[in-house]
Image (tube, helix red, strand yellow):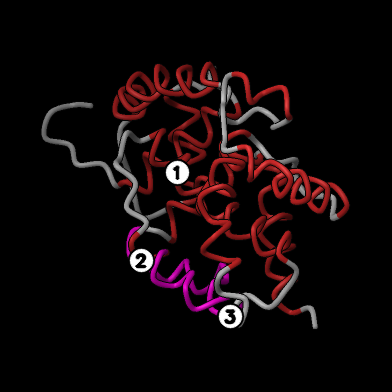
Amino acid sequence: MPKGIIVLKQVINLVGTLLSEDEKMTGKELKASVEDKIPQVNYTIRTYQSIKKKLLPKLAEIKASGLDNPWSLGTLVKHPLPAEIIPQILKVKEWATGKHLPVVSNRQAKWISRLYAVIKDNKSHWNKPLERSLWKASFIYTSYEIICDLTQTDPDTSEMDKVILKGEHEFTLGTVYKKPNIDKAVEAATYQYYGLGKAKHYLEYLENLEKEG
């Protein structure tokens, strides 16, 4: 990026989101799209070109990793997980399919593996079906990790970690979004991960899950 220019992290996140949908976007197109959504900023086209130049190699690396490809038993060859967690991931995958949510990715499967014991051991707080709780929690952690990968930022989930122990009713999108450095990152990552056109649908769908009796 041009020397002396300080670019908001929110802008970098959004540029990454847009490029993940269309890597051919020009600096002029990126400027128009970003500043339509964030009208308080006004960077030069050259600045957007510089951001793009910096992010494209990372985008290519993320795609090549296969982390965001659909998970299956076959993908364990390249993305191994503990054998004891496999049955639970299969159940979460089936639940998500039945709810018309995106299929579990290799990256999300890893988060399910990490979060399984935390949620299972807090049944009094996570009192909804385990598959639902695991999908929702892993969705939020996965989304945050993706944007950290894209912007080459070390993930710091300490705020989310505090909330997840409080259970289903506390670990909502609204609650997590209020935490410092997570709100815009998670939202931008969600757009990157699920596509610009579908992201709003999934965010609203998850919010509706919170209201179910």
Q: CA distance from mark 3 to mark 1?
A: 25 Å
User: Does residue 167 show up magenta in the picture?
Assistant: yes
User: Identity of the amino acid at label 2?
Assistant: Glu
Where is residue 78? Give x, y as percent. 57, 19
Residue, disc 1: 145
Left or right: where 145 falls relative to 152: right
**Residue occupying the point 50% across, 29% down:** 29
N-terminal label among 3 and 1? 3
Left or right: where 148 falls relative to 200: left
Tag nearer the camera, 3 or 2: 3
Which region is colored magenta? 161-181
Q: Residue furthest right?
A: 98
Q: How many numbered marks have been drawn onto this rendered protein structure?
A: 3
**Residue occupying the point 63% across, 26% down:** 76
- Examine the rendered structure and indicate whether residue 197 appears above or below residue 202: above
Residue 125: which numbered mark, if any?
Answer: 3
Quadrant holding the N terminus: top left
Where is residue 80? Give x, y as percent. 56, 28
**Residue occupying the point 58% across, 44% down:** 191
Judging depth in this view, the residue of 50 and 102 nearest the camera is 102
Secondary element under disc 2, as helix, strand or loop, is helix
- Examine the rendered structure and indicate whether residue 213 appears above or below residue 181: below
**Quadrant location of residue 51?**
top left
User: Identity of the amino acid at label 1?
Assistant: Glu
Residue 159: which numbered mark, if any?
Answer: 2
